[in-house]
Amino acid sequence: MNPKHAQLTALMTEYNAGDPKRIQHLIKVFQLASVIGTLEQVNEETLFVLETAAIVHDIGIRICEQKYHMCDGKHQELEGPAEARKLLATTGNYTEEQIERVCWLVGHHHTYKDIEGIDYQILVEADFLVNIYEDELPAENIRIIKQCIFRTPTGIRLLEDMYEKK
C-alpha cells in the first residue's frame, strides 16, 4: 500500500473511531477500487486519486447525521467534499489538483447519471460491490445495478463472481 494511503486510512479510522462498520466499509471500497483500477490499467495518477477518494468517499456521513439526523446520498454529496478537503489538507500529501478531483468524486459518488471519468466509474462500482453485500440486496436489484451502473470489465467480473455464481 502506498504510505500516503496508509496514513489516510489511519486518519479515517480515527475520524470514524467507534464505528467499525463504517471503517470496514471504507477499507473494502478502497481495496476493490484499487483492484479494479489496477486491472483496468488506469494510469498511476488516476489510480492514486481514485484510491484516495475511495478512502474518504463517505466522510460526509458523520456531519450529515449531526446536521440532518440522516445520511442519505445527496446530503453526503453536499457535506462530504468540505470534510474531505480539510482532512486531505492536514496531511500535506496531496496537490491542490488531486484534492479538487477527490472532493469532486466525493461530491458525486451517489450520482449515477452521466458518470464521466474512469475514476468516477470505478469508485461507484467499488462502492456498489460493497453495498450490495452490506445491504443484502436481492438478486433482481443486483441485476438492475449491473445493467445500469457497471461498465468496466473488471467490475462486471467481480460482481458476477461475488453475486451471480453459486
Image (cartoon, rainbow, N blue to C red):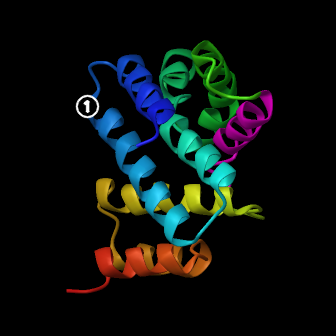
Q: Main secondary structure of the magenta part?
A: helix
Residue found 43% across the figure and 21% down from its top: 11
Examine the structure image and report whether residue 106 is included in the region drawn in magenta.
yes
Residue 35 appears in which quarter of the rendering? Answer: bottom left
Expressed as whole percent of the image width and height from the top left, the position of residue 100 reads 77, 34
User: What residue is disc 1 on?
Assistant: 20
Q: Amino acid at mark 1?
A: Pro
Residue 113 appears in which quarter of the rendering? Answer: bottom right
Range drawn in magenta: 96-111
Expressed as whole percent of the image width and height from the top left, the position of residue 118 reads 68, 63
Expressed as whole percent of the image width and height from the top left, the position of residue 50 reads 60, 49
Residue found 67% across the figure and 53% down from its top: 46
Instruction: For the N terminus, give its image quadrant.
Output: top left
Examine the structure image and report whether residue 95 is included in the region drawn in magenta.
no
Expressed as whole percent of the image width and height from the top left, the position of residue 102 reads 68, 38
Q: Is residue 97 above or below residue 163?
A: above
Residue found 75% across the figure and 61% down from its top: 117
Residue 153 shows in this picture: yes
Q: Is residue 91 left or right of residue 8?
A: right
